[in-house]
Image (cartoon, rainbow, N blue to C red):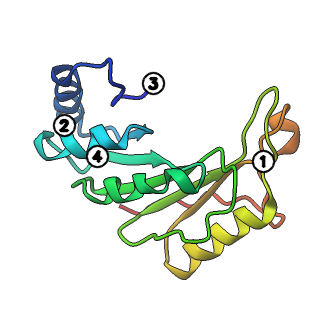
Amino acid sequence: MSDLFHEKIPDYFIARIFDIMNRASWHRFQILTKRSDRLRRMSPDLPWADNIWMGVTVEDRKCAFRIEHLRGTPAEIKFISMEPLLEPIAELDLIGIDWVIVGGESGPGARPLNEDWAMDIKEKCQTSNIPFFFKQWGGVNKKKSGRLLEGRLWNQMPLR
């Protein structure tokens, strides 16, 4: 588990991984990156099969630019992982996005997830008919804090 678009991973290796994912069409691959600049640069030269889902991490407002880079890819499914969600993101543009995952930070020193932030994103997803997945509240003991939002589990996923 690492960032496929990390600067230390050679371009040829990324291309090879994409080739393997294309040949393994019976699997669904979910790639998540914080390095959306490199994703944007390499995307036109990569072989995108329908089983390759591409996502970017957006933990705060200053990282929201990654969504535009994601939109520029030919990935069949484009998703945003807002985990850990560290602040409200009021101006969240979900056009061209197929799935949103929200969760809190976990581990020692974890910053709290405000319920209003998660609810705002859930409502934006519902308004836009985008599947919403609430992963966790986070905290020092994430299992103890659970996954319920509004008293229920949110496990929605794209249909494609």
Mark 1 or mark 2, earlier in chain: 2
Q: Secondary structure at mark 1?
A: loop
Mark 3 or mark 4, earlier in chain: 3
Quadrant including the C terminus: bottom left
Rounded to the nearest whole Å, what is the CA distance between mark 3 and mark 2? Answer: 20 Å
**Does residue 29 appear anywhere in the picture?**
no
Dividing the picture into quarters, in which one does residue 108 lie?
A: top right
Q: Which residue is mark 3?
A: 2
Disc 4 marks a residue whose amino acid type is Asn
Rounded to the nearest whole Å, what is the CA distance between mark 2 and mark 4? Answer: 7 Å
Disc 1 marks a residue whose amino acid type is Trp
Image check: 97 left or right of 62?
left
Q: Secondary structure at mark 2?
A: helix
Q: Which residue is mark 2?
A: 22
Marks 2/4 in contact by CB < 8 Å: the verdict is yes
**Residue 116, horizontal then vertical, whole percent:** 78, 67
Disc 3 marks a residue whose amino acid type is Ser
Residue furthest front in the image: 62
Nearer the observer, 106 or 136: 106
Q: Which residue is mark 4?
A: 51
Rounded to the nearest whole Å, what is the CA distance between mark 4 and mark 1? Answer: 29 Å
**Residue 56, horizontal then vertical, whole percent:** 44, 47
Q: Secondary structure at mark 3?
A: loop
Rounded to the nearest whole Å, what is the CA distance between mark 3 and mark 1? Answer: 22 Å
Rounded to the nearest whole Å, what is the CA distance between mark 1 and mark 2? Answer: 34 Å
Q: Which residue is mark 1?
A: 137
Q: Nearer the viewer, mark 4 or mark 1?
A: 1
Image check: 8 left or right of 93?
left
Mark 3 or mark 1, earlier in chain: 3
